[in-house]
Amino acid sequence: MSPLRFELTPTDDGQDVLIRVLDEDGDGLEGLADATDLDELIARLGELRALLSDAVPERLEPTGRVAAIRDPAWWCQPRKEDFGVCFRHPGYGWLAFGLPPHEAKALGGWLLKDPPEV
């Protein structure tokens, strides 16, 4: 199967993204996606990514680099089975996690152990 090339360009008015999907000959299709379309696409891509045999590593390598969002909005609530924790990412939306009690306690302890100077 031929590899695909994706070209993604925001429209001038900032309301949509033009998505072009091209094959190796430059043939393909294009269309506009609004914020709702992109949210659905991102969610579906995440679901499919989780199914691949080349899994996301269980641990972040010490030399690994990730783009951190500084001072994100967050929300948390204790639930019957765990602690619901959500962080807002400006591109991916609200990312939700369920921390079991022992992990929530470990994270809380680590965060309070050596707080940064502000």
Image (tube, grey):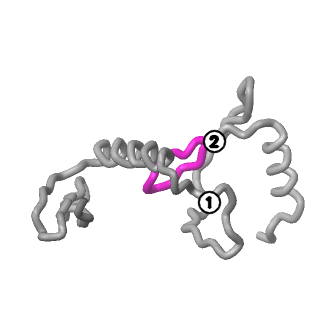
Identified by mark 2, the residue type is Phe
Circles 1 and 2 in contact, beta carbons < 8 Å = no
Q: Residue at x 42, y 45 (%)?
A: 48
Q: Which residue is drawn at 43% across and 56% down?
A: 91
Alpha carbons under labels 1 and 2: distance apart? 18 Å
Give the extent of the magenta segment: 86-96
Left or right, 57 with respect to 99, comes to left
Residue 79: image quadrant is: top right
- Asked whether 9 or 62 is in front, the reply is 62
Residue 89 in the image: x percent, y percent?
51, 54
**Can you say which quadrant of the picture contains the N terminus?**
bottom left
Identified by mark 1, the residue type is Asp
Q: Is 67 drawn above or below residue 82 in the view shown? A: below
Residue 63: image quadrant is: bottom right
Q: Is 113 drawn above or below residue 83 in the view shown? A: below
SS category of the residue bearing label 2: strand
User: In the rendered image, which residue does mark 2 sit on?
Assistant: 97
Residue 101 in the image: x percent, y percent?
81, 36
Label 2 neighbour load within 10 Å: few <14, some 14-19, many 20+: few
- The residue most toward the bottom is 63
User: In the rendered image, which residue does mark 1 sit on?
Assistant: 71
Residue 32, magenta (yes or no) = no
Left or right, 65 with respect to 100, comes to left
Residue 23 in the image: x percent, y percent?
18, 64
Q: Is 81 drawn above or below residue 15 in the view shown? A: above
Label 1 neighbour load within 10 Å: few <14, some 14-19, many 20+: few
Q: Which residue is drawn at 56% across and 62% down?
A: 69
SS category of the residue bearing label 1: loop
